[in-house]
């Protein structure tokens, strides 16, 4: 039977509260989801120390890339109420399993994702191979709860891998350690026999993923509930992964430090020298949510991308395809706009260095060596109040307070136009700019300095000359 809106409503009437047990258990332990995902990693293991020796070379492409596509797509997409629907709506497992029979993606939907990623200027992709629901999107030999044995009737992971490679994109696999479907998925916390079965199952699934699809570039763990790194045998897990894929990079969500940290739905730079990647949604949902219209604008996406690059990190931006794999129109339009901007301004993002610069409401900054890129999101235009002044000229002026060191030249990245400027101990003033912003959703100005540029607005406070005045009480 086709999964229509009427059958969905009938299905929802049968929901019970069983699906909420895992969340209740997590709450009882005082853990939020993000807290569980981003808990402080364990001390460096011997496996991590071995990986550190090759980390710089393995991650060279990743640091250059800056921008990737996250894809959340699975059985939850059929419901259309975001990826946590089973738990948030309390759907009993027997009812949720029915969805697998009615998950019918169109052929090669991943080709459209990969083409959009390339058009958007994204350099790598990370797809949910198994989310918390426990459904395996590949031809697993360890469970029949997989895409080949259920509704799709084919290997969706293979289609994704082939699509990404066809567009020259790096391939990443998301894998949720937490599993709402496996009978030992929660029991493993308190039952050693269950833990042994579930850990062997988990390691076996990861082995399949990293054995059957050629070279894989990223493994993106998620949600380590309910076990500790010792319970998951995370050191042995990572050793297996690097035996199978010596050039892979892994994140920190199996409890070990891994190669990079993963702030979620916020941008927080890691300490200097530590790689990090902010993963964020394009609206407010990871998985497809037919009612979520809180779409971020291209201006917000471009600003987020610059903020990540300024802090030396990457931006992993999520899309939630519809049940058949189609890309929501708002997603398509936004990413295409971002891609057109990157066609011109990519040099201000890709391969940039961490910048010692504080952004402001009007502008953001990125850096490459001694070159500062000013990302002007809100163009100043002219100042009507100044028109009465005899020396007023109809031009835009941009002033950057606290910029060091000496500026040698400046130009508009969009047009190549040379920009006149003056500089004193407080301010760089860029003059003679057009009244209308030359580019959207941000105009980038390339500023060459005679040393590594820094922008510290606060540094001017103790330097301001204060007017002398008599103060009487």
Image: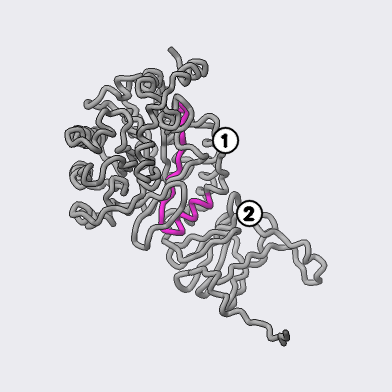
Give the percent coordinates (x, y) of residue 39: 34, 50
Separation (CA) of disc 1 from disc 2: 30 Å
Side of 329 relative to 83 (left or right) = right
Q: Residue at x 63, y 82 (%)?
A: 465
Q: How is the image coloured?
A: one colour
**Quadrant in the picture for residue 135:** top left
Q: Which residue is mark 2?
A: 438
Mark on residue 442?
A: none
Q: Which residues are magenta?
A: 302-326
Circle nearer the N terminus (1, 2) = 1
Residue 58 in view: no
Q: Secondary structure at mark 1?
A: loop
Give the percent coordinates (x, y) of residue 23: 38, 36
Q: Residue at x 28, y 34 (%)?
A: 186
Magenta stretch encompasses residue 134: no
Q: Which residue is mark 1?
A: 293
Side of 136 relative to 20 (left or right) = left
Image quadrant holding the C terminus, namely bottom right
Identify which residue, 224 or 378, lies in the foreground: 224
């Amino acid at each position: 039977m086709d999964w229509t809106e009427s059958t969905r409503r009938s299905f929802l009437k049968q929901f019970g509260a069983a699906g909420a047990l895992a969340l209740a258990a997590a709450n009882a332990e005082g853990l939020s989801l993000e807290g569980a995902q981003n808990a402080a990693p364990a001390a460096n293991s011997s496996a991590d120390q071995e990986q550190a020796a090759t980390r710089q070379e393995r991650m060279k492409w990743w640091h250059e890339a800056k921008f990737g596509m996250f894809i959340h797509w699975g059985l939850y997409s059929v419901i259309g109420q975001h990826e946590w629907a089973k738990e948030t709506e309390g759907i009993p497992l027997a009812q949720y399993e029915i969805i697998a029979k009615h998950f019918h993606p169109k052929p090669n939907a991943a080709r459209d994702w990969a083409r959009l990623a390339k058009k958007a200027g994204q350099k790598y992709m990370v797809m949910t191979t198994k989310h918390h629901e426990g459904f395996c999107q590949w031809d697993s030999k360890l469970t029949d709860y997989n895409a080949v044995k259920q509704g799709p009737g084919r290997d969706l992971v293979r289609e994704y891998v082939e699509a990404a490679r066809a567009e020259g994109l790096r391939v990443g696999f998301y894998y949720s350690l937490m599993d709402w479907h496996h009978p030992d998925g929660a029991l493993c916390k308190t039952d050693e026999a269950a833990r042994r079965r579930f850990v062997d199952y988990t390691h076996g699934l990861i082995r399949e993923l990293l054995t059957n699809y050629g070279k894989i570039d990223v493994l993106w763990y998620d949600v380590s509930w309910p076990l500790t790194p010792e319970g998951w045998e995370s050191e042995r897990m990572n050793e297996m992964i690097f035996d199978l894929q010596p050039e892979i990079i892994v994140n920190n969500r199996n409890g070990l430090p891994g190669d990079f940290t993963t702030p979620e739905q916020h941008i927080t730079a890691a300490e200097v020298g530590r790689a990090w990647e902010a993963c964020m949604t394009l609206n407010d949902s990871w998985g497809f949510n037919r009612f979520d219209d809180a779409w971020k604008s291209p201006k917000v996406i471009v600003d987020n991308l610059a903020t990540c690059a300024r802090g030396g990190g990457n931006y992993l931006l999520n899309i939630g395809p519809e049940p058949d794999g189609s890309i929501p129109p708002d997603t398509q339009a936004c990413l295409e706009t971002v891609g057109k901007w990157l066609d011109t301004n990519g040099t201000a993002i890709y391969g940039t260095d961490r910048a010692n610069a504080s952004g402001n409401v009007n502008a953001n900054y990125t850096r490459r060596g001694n070159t500062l890129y000013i990302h002007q999101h809100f163009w100043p235009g002219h100042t009507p109040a100044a028109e009465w002044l005899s020396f007023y000229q109809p031009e835009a002026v941009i002033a950057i307070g606290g910029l060091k060191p000496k500026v040698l030249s400046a130009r508009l990245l969009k047009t190549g136009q040379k920009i006149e400027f003056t500089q004193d101990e407080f301010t760089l003033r860029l003059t003679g700019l057009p009244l209308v912003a030359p580019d959207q959703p941000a105009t980038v100005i390339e500023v060459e300095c005679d040393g590594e540029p820094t922008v510290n607005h606060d540094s001017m406070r103790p330097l301001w000359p204060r007017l002398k005045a008599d103060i009487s009480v």
